[in-house]
Each structure stands twice: as C-alpha cells, then as structure tokens.
Amino acid sequence: MQVITTHVNADFDCLAAMVAAGRLYPGAHMVFSGSAERAVNDYLKETALPFKLSRVRDIDLGQVSRLILVDTQDTSRIGPFRPLAESPGVEVHVYDHHPEGPDGVSAALSVIRKRGAATTLLVELLLEKGIALSPEESTLMALGIFQDTASLLSPSTTAEDFSALARLVGTGADLNRVARYLNRELNPEQLDVLNELIGGLETHNINGVDIALATASAEHFIEDLAQVVHSVMDLENLDVLVALIRLDRRVYLIGRSRREGVDVAQLAGEFGGGGHPQAASAAIRDLTLPQAREKVLALLREKARPLYLVRDIMHRPVVSIPSDKNLGEAEKLLTRFNLNTLPVVVDGKPVGLITRQTVEKALHHKMARLSIGDFMAQEFAVTTPDVYFKTLVPIIIEEKQKLVPVVEPDSGALIGVVSRGDLLRVLYADMAGTRGPQPFAGAKGAPKNLRSLLKERLDKNIMHLLETVSQVAHREKFSVHVVGGFVRDLLLGIENHDVDLVVEGDGIAFARALGRELSAKVKSHAKFGTSVLILPDRSRVDVATSRMEYYKHPAALPTVEKGSVKADLFRRDFTVNSMAIKLNGENPFVLIDPFQGERDIRDRMIRVLHNLSFIEDPCRMFRAVRFEQRFGFRLGKQTEAFLKYAVEKRWVDRLSGSRLMNELVLLLKEASPVACIHRLHELGLLRCISPGLEPSTPGPLERIEGVLAWSKMVPMEEPAEVWYVYLLGLLHPLDEEAFDVALLRLDSPVRLAKRLTADREALQAARTLVEGKQEPGTLEIHRYFSALSPEAAVFLLAWANSERANRCATLYFTQYQALGRTALTGDDLIRMGVAPGPVFQKIFQALKDARLSGQIKNREDEMDLVKKQFLG
C-alpha cells in the first residue's frame, strides 16, 4: 500500500501537492496527517473532486510499504505516520520546498527544490512526464501556489512559481475561484482578535531589525488565525511580526517575516513547530502568554541576525604596509592590489592610514624615498568584528574616513578592513529591503542554501565526500569551500566529479587531516600551498590555500599570496567560475556569489571580473570562447569589447607558445570544436597563431565529425585522437611558410612538430592516390594508407570528400591492413643471418608486397622469400 500525506494543519499547498503526487503515484491513498485549515475544509465540501481523501483510521499502517511526504520532510510534524517514516521496512519519498531541519527523514527518493510552494515542484514533475491536468486539478494547484506565495508577493517566490502558474492557467485554472477562497472576509471572532493584536502591537529593535510582537486571547478555538496575522502585517506595513494568541489553555505562535535576518521557521522550531523562513507557526504548551512572550523575545535576541555585523562585510586578510617602508613601496603595493588606502602597521597593529592621493602627490614632488610614517594619517578610528555594521556610518560618511581597520578587541591586532564601498553596498541593501552582495568568510545566514540541490543532483559518493569535508573542517577549525567549475556545473545541472576545495588558512594542514579521515594519499606543494588527495577509489580531490594574485606584467604567470575566499574568487577568469559553496561554519552549504555568477548563468552570459582581465592573462580569451560554446552562452557586451581591444593591441603576442598551445588543445577537445574555431576566427584570435589561418566554410572541418563516427566502425589499429584531427585540419590549408610560422608560434614540442609535418606530407601523397585518373590497386592503397596515422586517415576522408577515398579507406582498414602484417620480426632476420641496416626496410617492404599480391601466405613462405632474394 502507498500513502501520500503532509504535515498537520494542512493548507491549500498541502492539498494541491497531495493531489499532484497522486498523479505520480496512481492508486496511492491520500490522507491528512492531522487537521486542515477551515478554507481547505470548505473547499472540499463545496467542490466535486475527481479524487478521494482517506481517513487515518481507514489505513492499516502495517500494510503500508511506501510513504510519500509532500510539503514536509519533518517527521515531528506528520502525526501518526512518524513511525512509518522511521521504519526500515517502509520506503519514503519526499517532495518538499523547505530547507532541511533537525528532524528530516531519511528518504529513498528526495526531491527538494527552492520554490515558493511545494505544488510548484510537483507541477514541474508532472509537466516533465507529460501528465495532463484537468481544469479542476489546475485550479486547485494554482490555489496552492497562490496561497503559499502570498499571491506571488512573498520573498520566497521564485521564477518557477510564475512559470508553473502560467502553465496551470493554460490548462484551465479558474482564477475567479482562486480569488474567492483566498480573499475571504474575516468573521466577527477573527475581527476581535485582529483588533486586539493591533491594539497590543509593540516594536522591538533587535540587532538593528525592527520586529513587531503582538498578543491576543480568546476563550475558545478560532480557525484560520494565520489569515488574521497576515491582515495585521498588511494593515500595519510590518516587515516582521510574531503573534502570540492564547486559545483556551494553549498559546499559538504565528510568525511572518519579510527580512532576511529573521527566520521565523527557526523560531517556531524552538517550540516544536515549523514552516518557511518567511511564514511559520507552533503550538506552545505549558507556558502562559506572558511566559511565552518573554521566551520569544529572548530567542529573538539570540537568533535574529542583524543584516550585517562588521565581520560579515570586512575584507581579510588585509594588505597592509609596515611604517618603516617608503612612499615608493607604498605606491607599488597600492597599484599591485588596486587599492586606494593602506593601513600602516607596527607589529601587526594599525598606527595610521596612507591614501593613494597622498602617495601620488608626494611622488609628483620626488619624495618616493621618504618614509610613509611622516605622511600617514595618524588620527583615525578602528572597529571590532562583532559590532553592528551601521556603527561605521558616522566614521565613513560623516568623518570621511575611507577605510576602517578592524582589530581584535583584546590584542588590537589588525584582522580586517571595511571600505566606503563595502558600507554603501550594505546600506543600499538595507534601504531596499534586500540582501545585496553575498557575505564572505563566515558571514551568518547567507540566503541561498544549496544542501538540497546538492543531494538532488550529486552522486551519493560525492555528497558523502562533501559532508565528510564539512565535518573535518568543523573539527579542525578551518573554513573550507568547494569552488569553481564544480559549483557552476551544479547550478547548470551538469555532472562534474572534479572537487576543488579552497581553505582559508593552512590548506596543506587541512589536506593532511582530510587525508587521514579518507585514508587517502596526500601530495603537497608547499611553495603554492596546494595538495592533491588520491582516494582509495583512485579519484582525486584538489585542496588549495585561498589566495590572491597579481601580475608583474601582462601575460605573465601570476604571483600569488595568501588571501580570503573572496580574494581567491576575484582572481578567477569569469563570474560563472567565481562562485563557492561554504562547507562548514554556522550556515554550511550556502552559495557564496560575490560577482553575480548565478545571475550570469541564468542570463547565459560569460563576463570577466575586471577590465584588465584579458590583458593580464590573454589565455582567458581562448577560455571565454571555450565556455561560450560549451554552454551555449554568449560573451557579455562589455566583455566582448575588452576581448576585441586586447586582440587589436596584440596582447596575445606576449603569451608564451606553450600556454597558447595548451589553450588551443583544450579548445579542440570540446564537444563542438568547429564552432570554437569559427568563433576564434570571428574574434580575430586565429590570426594570432598564424596570419593566414582561416577556416573555410563549409569545408573539411565540418566533415570531420562524420568521418570520426565512421572510424569507430572499422578496425583501426588505434583510435584517432579527436583534438589532433582538428589541429591537423586547422593547420593543413596553410602554405609551407605559414605552417612553419604556426609551429614556431605554438612552440610545438619537437615530437608533435615532427608528427604534424610527417602527416602533412603523407596527406599530400595520399591525395594524389584518391584523386588520380586510374583506380588504385591493392599495393598502392596499402602503401599510401599505411603511411598515414589514424588521425591523418580521418582527415584525408574529410578533405577529399569523395567516393573513391571512402572506398580505398574501407578496403584498407577492413582487408589490406591485416594482409600487410608480416610474421617475421627484426630479431628473426638477425637469426637468419641478415646484418641490421637499411636492408631491413627493403626486406619488410618486399614481404608486405608479396603478401598483398598473394605470392606468400605464412611464415615459412616469408623465410623462403628472404633466403631467395636477400641471402641467395
């Protein structure tokens, strides 16, 4: 037996999600685990539904083999079904849009997505499976989405909620009926509670956030108090409201929040309740109304997070300068790290600030050798990490101090800085009622937790690995993030097992601790602060100390120094590769996205992080094309302008040939190398390899893919290396001089250069064979094709594009290739008395020709031929 259920006190989202799940699990029993809201009961009474709800007492719990939970994964909120969820003999499937809580169920199937309503994710699954919905089902599901997203106005509403509603309207959802059930007038009892809540409304500023608290009492149970609380929120224009309502002997908590810093689900959870961060409830037992009020206030002071503490927005580690350095050294440091102000330190403690403006004026007056101690500002304010960020407003805005050092309260040691830009960004976020930029390095309450997405999309072994990393990082007191392409591909839904970890602190020490936990071999490079873990299954994990970098000159390899995770992300090539997932700390598995990489993934854009990106590292131009074509993205307008400027000014010329060759090979290994090549040509990058390099359209390059498919069906001695086929095809149209220029520019290894040259010559010879007037014979076909590498043979067919070429190649690989193999070896010839030398080549050619012409058939025949022709 299969049972579909939801949490107690079911709303329209619960009912709609159950009905949707019923379409996925035909024949399953739909059962409320507890009561339902009055509006839901009214709907069930007034509507002729094509489905039937069962009662708990009608279900034989001992016969249930599968339990399907919707709109919850919290076993403490499913009433009589909790023992089933915890039974090893019952298979549990979960469909939910809430973040995981402490009582989350262990499920065989778990579909958890960040949506405004559980109904949305189930509608998505129904659409994916092509399951048609009736107008009545569509209306109910629209009702569920509208209610749980507060008519699409809740901060938790997502783009997917809008899309699901659009599809439901298209399948017949009746919005008039939706409005009738959502916009119900309050009855007299509810109006009494509403007036009492408004009359007793009190506002508390907790950690910089205004939180409204209201209380009311009634002597008997009143239904749908959530609607009453919602009305108070709207009437009083509140951001956060916690209502405590005594009904008979029990106090009910109903919380609503529109601020990131106040998670009312966490508050309700302290009393055994639950819900969303924006809407939650709980039934409070064994406390009077005044006692409940005092406990709620105490919990809010403990758990309500200010929008930002100073530690949430500060930068660390700090780029600073000792007071005994001169102005010239200060100027180099300011330029190297693109800073406007430097803290001046003595023994790690700030003693002054030196600005770029001061330094530049001093250098203008030829004072580069003078000490910065004579020019620094010695009157300045400092702050500590655990104070509310708005305490910096008078310092930065009114006193015009551009940079505020952050010091340890006890020692006075410099641990971070906050700039004017940092403050303005969070002030804007505060005024706009949004979060603004993501926090860094231990910030509390980052808004986007990806644990559910990780569980949904990752292989179980990879998820277990990340959870182990999280545990070890917590135990060893390191801050660890998974970064780069792994995060990008997770958001794109692309499988990626390359786990790259960044550690704030000593990455090598963490790698050793992790290696002990995983029984892995650890190879470390102290110079770079990196390690590689080789796991027992031979998979690998890369671990690096978080770094910042600068370039001594354009196209140079970067110089790296220890830095924060933000600095580590800033040194990367594109915004889509500059995201991280925090693996431990107060809020693990949250997305760290300081440069809006997730937005660019949604917009399908490739953007650089700063305007000198292509100049500092011209390799990024080729990577931009690679990622653009791989993901079907496009270069951002400004990014493309930066790239074209770098090409025009020939910054690629400063790139070493080996680095250019490496980027070209990576590009040719992409799934769509021809598209990459044409995009390189369009952007002018092919001319940077050789002036005459220009792919013809349509031409041999476009035909290579088809020939490669053919090559997998014939018995080639070795499979063709795909990237090399395309490289051969790319360089083949060049004349001899341009070809040599290309090899020189790419700084091709001697072995590769010889291989390309040999294949080029063999191709020219074979072309005469397949284009000649007379049909070639067996010996000719074998002689020419045996001189070709597998890659050259593939390119020959793409180049010649003729029936004769195809026929000759098929004959060679299916018949003549095997016929031309000799039984005798060089050792055999020596034993027969043949002295090593050029004669060996003549002997083997004679043996091959004789075999191909049918004159000899076995080893004995070969020995006879050698004796007669070469030893007679």
Image (cartoon, helix red, strand yellow):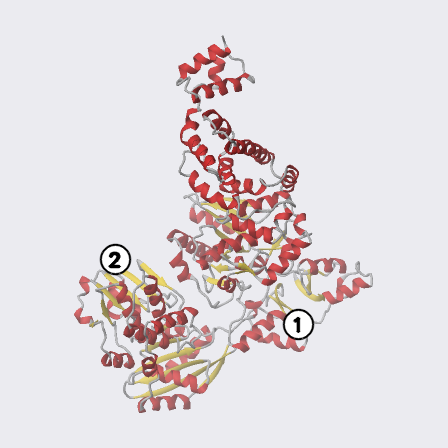
Q: Quadrant of the N terminus?
A: bottom left
Give the Cα separation between the discs numbered 2 and 1: 61 Å
Q: Earlier in the sequence, mark 2 or mark 1?
A: 2
Residue 271: percent from left, percent from top: 35, 74
Residue 550 is at least partly visible in this image: no
Q: Nearer the viewer, mark 2 or mark 1?
A: 2
The front one of 328 and 37 is 37
Q: As drawn, which residue projects farthest toward the right?
A: 365
Q: Which residue is mark 2?
A: 88
- Residue 603 pos. (x, y %): 50, 64
Q: Position of residue 763 (x, y in %)?
A: 54, 34
Query: Identity of the amino acid at label 2?
Result: Pro
Kindly identify the amino acid type of the residue bearing the numbered disc 1: Ala
SS category of the residue bearing label 2: loop
Q: Nearer the viewer, residue 649 or 347?
A: 649
Residue at image point 43% right, 62% down = 450
**In the image, residue 545 lies at what x, y percent?**
55, 53
The extreme top residue here reads: 872
Disc assigned to residue 37: none
- At horizontal 39% and vertical 51% (from top left) the residue drawn is 461
Secondary structure of the residue carrying tag 1 is loop
Q: Where residue 381 is drawn, which disc sits there?
A: 1
Q: Quadrant of residue 323?
A: bottom right
Reply above or below: 564 against 256: above
Q: Nearer the viewer, residue 662 or 337?
A: 662
Query: Is residue 280 among the parts visible in the rendering?
Result: yes
